Amino acid sequence: MNISPFFFYLFAGSAIAFALLTVLKKNPVASAFSLILVFFSFAGIYALLGAHLVAAMQVLVYAGAIMVLFIFVIMLLNADTPSFDMGRSHRLLRWGSAVLGLALFATFVWVFKNSAALGTKGAFTPVAIEAAGGNTQVLSELMFSEYILPFELTSVLLLAAIVGAVAIAKRGKKRVGHAG
Amino acid sequence: MDQLDWIITVGKCALIAFILLQVVPLMVWVERRGSALMQNRLGPNRLGPLGLFQGIADAVKMLFKEDRIPGHVHALYYKLAPVVCLVPAFMTFAVIPFGSQITVGERVLNFQVADLNVGLLYVFSIASLGVYGIIMAGWSSNNKYALLGSLRSSAQMISYELSLGLSVIGILMIFSSVKLGDIARQQGEILLQLGPISIPKWGIFVQPLGFLIFMTSIFAETNRLPFDLPEGESEIVAGYHLEYGTMQFGLFMMAEYINMTVGAAMITTLYFGGWQLLPGMSAIHAHLGDLLALSDMAREWVRVGLEITSFTLKVVFFLWFFVWVRWTVPRFRYDQVMDLGWKVMLPLSLVNIFVTGVLIYYKVI
């Protein structure tokens, strides 16, 4: 499978550029909009790799659903620029984070250069997936047969999170009721 | 892909974009004349036959107005917002089939821009982006009413996207495919034979509850009445597009009507057989072929023509339905919208999935 280098560099470049904007923008809403474009660039790369389902899910779940919630919360709290402006941090902290960041980057480079596992191909080559009926079919079959337990456990985890959120919201409401 | 394939694909894209753009002025006209009809008045009737050219006059007016940007807005996002609203609306139509296929020589011509493997998921992922235009507009306008409008819009979209997504699971279970081409094709099968009348396996007959939930959610997603809380002019002036004028406001209008068209096309494809011929049309096809003594190839072209016609007629009906509902039902209150979404639509769509599963298990459907 050949990936067009032009499109790869286009999406990779825009991902890096918008990731930087996400961090550097002072305005929280502008940061969030940049993050959406980062997710988009990722989706483009997934689509180039032939993983159309992952690309669609990336846009649907991250760019579509989660980021709407993010922006909704930011706008609801009306977080304006000053509350996010924490001033200049301590000099030691700044230098420390720069060194740690560079160390992380170096580790990534080293791993990608030296790891043997990256070069090996699994059973799911593009040809095999196409023969089995495409991305969506193959992934759904695996998810609902071999990996049913992790799948169900994840949904239980999400359910627990929802119940927790509702419980916290209800508790706050009762207190307000008593006061009023 | 050789050169001709490229030309065909680009041609199809251009054709769809062109038609969607023509739908906008026509729908504005239908909306104004339709509301006038229902309110027992005349509506625009001066320009052209039946006032049909009113849309052109509106566009000219918007284009020649002074393009003024208020001083208190975030200029970049303010200018970007209408575009962000409009682009996803166009993109969604790429996977909707508006006819079956025809074999010309050795080339199979599909009447669909791209039959993606992820089909329906693509539609949902692109449709979920439309809300950013509204959010961006409301936030960058730096105006309380506009911000309220976009807050309402994002809350509404999140709530109804859930029931929208869950309501089509039933369809996916029955046709066991997410490709819209497959779904449309399988709806040609016969569900029931009642004497001379055969009922096709259209989505509405196998998923009546799913259809109701889907359609309600589409109304909410396109911000049409009774769900037009984001612009509710009696409470928040004009909501998210309060600060916009000229053609920038025009772009929001276009996005709304194109979203409606895509919504109508989705309802048609999933629940009304897509390009499947309307009742009686197959008889017309056979008679016309015999009457004119057409060759096999010509008959094929007539079939494709009839298919595109029936798809268009179904879409037109649902577009009219959008207008019909708008001028019939009053706007919901905000808490009613949320209650309906979370306490009625979401549980009902879960029930629908469960019942569909049971019916498929016992091989009723």
Image (cartoon, coloured by chain):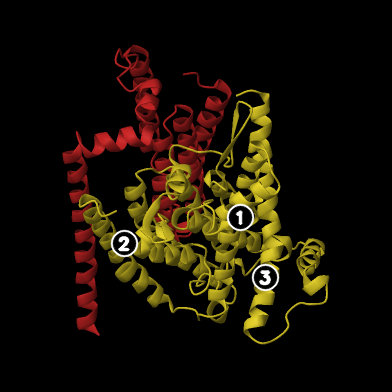
Q: Are marks 3 and 2 in contact (CB under 8 Å)?
A: no
Q: Which residue is mark 1?
A: B284
- In the image, which lettered chain appears yellow? B
Relative depth, front residue between B170 and B110? B110
Is residue B360 depicted above or below B250 in this figure? above
Ranked by sequence position, the earlier of labels 2 and 1 is 1
**The N terminus of chain B lies in quadrant:** top right
Which residue corresponds to the image point at 54% horizontal and 56% vertical from the top-left?
B265
Which residue corresponds to the image point at 45% horizontal and 49% vertical from the top-left?
B188
Q: Residue B45's x, y, as percent?
A: 79, 77
Q: Residue B59's x, y, as percent?
A: 77, 63
Determine the CA span between mark 3 and mark 2: 32 Å
Q: Residue B153's x, y, as percent?
A: 48, 65
Q: Which residue is mark 3?
A: B30
The amino acid sitting under disc 2 is: Ser
Q: Are marks 3 and 1 in contact (CB under 8 Å)?
A: no
Label 3 CA crowd tier, 10 Å (few <14, some 14–19, many 20+): some
Ranked by sequence position, the earlier of labels 3 and 2 is 3
The amino acid sitting under disc 3 is: Val
Relative depth, front residue between B8 and B32? B8
Q: Chain of mark 2?
A: B
Q: Which residue is mark 2?
A: B349
Q: Give the colour in which the image draws chain A.
A: red
Q: Of the residues tagged 3 and 1, which is closer to the observer?
A: 1
Is residue A25 depicted above or below B327 in this figure? above
